[in-house]
Amino acid sequence: MRIVICGWPASGKSRHAEELSSKLGIEVKHTDSLVRTHSWSDASEAASHWFDQPGPWIIEGVAVPRALRKWQARHPDEDPPFDQFILMPIPDEKIQADMKAGQITMGKGHDTVLRGLEDWLGPWL
């Protein structure tokens, strides 16, 4: 099984991924671990190569849409590289009120990239 989890900052991606990992015994790869040591562009490029690895795996993070976009650019005629796609809900207004401006920007960027992938991701969204 190959599971992708994406969503805004503070939407519960990591928590949900860890719960699934415990339940299913599947390794989780966190795109945040790459962002700490790479630029955003390099992090999503590195994460895009995770999709080439055979499952089972769970890949989660705000950078997932950008990683999928880069994977698709290398594999333009292939279907998405996962079995399950989980889009976490946007945090409610109370949580957003406590977010830093950069987190809001990341969330909006996440949504923009996903909209650009709508034709390819189709039924997954």
Image (tube, rainbow, N blue to C red):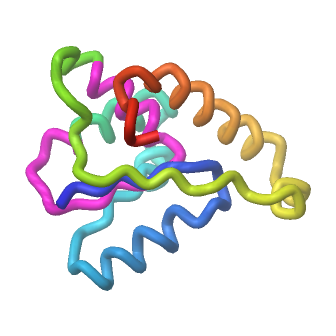
Residue at the image point whose x is 69% and y is 52% from the top: 90
Residue 5 location, x and y as percent? 43, 54
- Taking the magenta stretch, the answer to whether it contains residue 5 is no
Q: Is residue 91 left or right of residue 114?
A: right
Q: Is residue 89 left or right of residue 80?
A: right
Residue at the image point whose x is 21% and y is 39% from the top: 81
Q: Is residue 102 left or right of residue 43?
A: right
Q: Nearer the viewer, residue 10 or 118?
A: 118
Which corner quadrant of the image does residue 75 belong to? top left
Residue at the image point whose x is 15% and y is 62% from the top: 56
Q: Nearer the viewer, residue 120 or 9?
A: 120
Which corner quadrant of the image does residue 38 belong to? top left
Which corner quadrant of the image does residue 12 belong to? bottom right
Residue 89 location, x and y as percent? 63, 55
- Taking the magenta stretch, the answer to whether it contains residue 70 is yes
Q: Which residues are magenta?
A: 50-72
Q: Which image quarter holds the N terminus?
A: bottom left
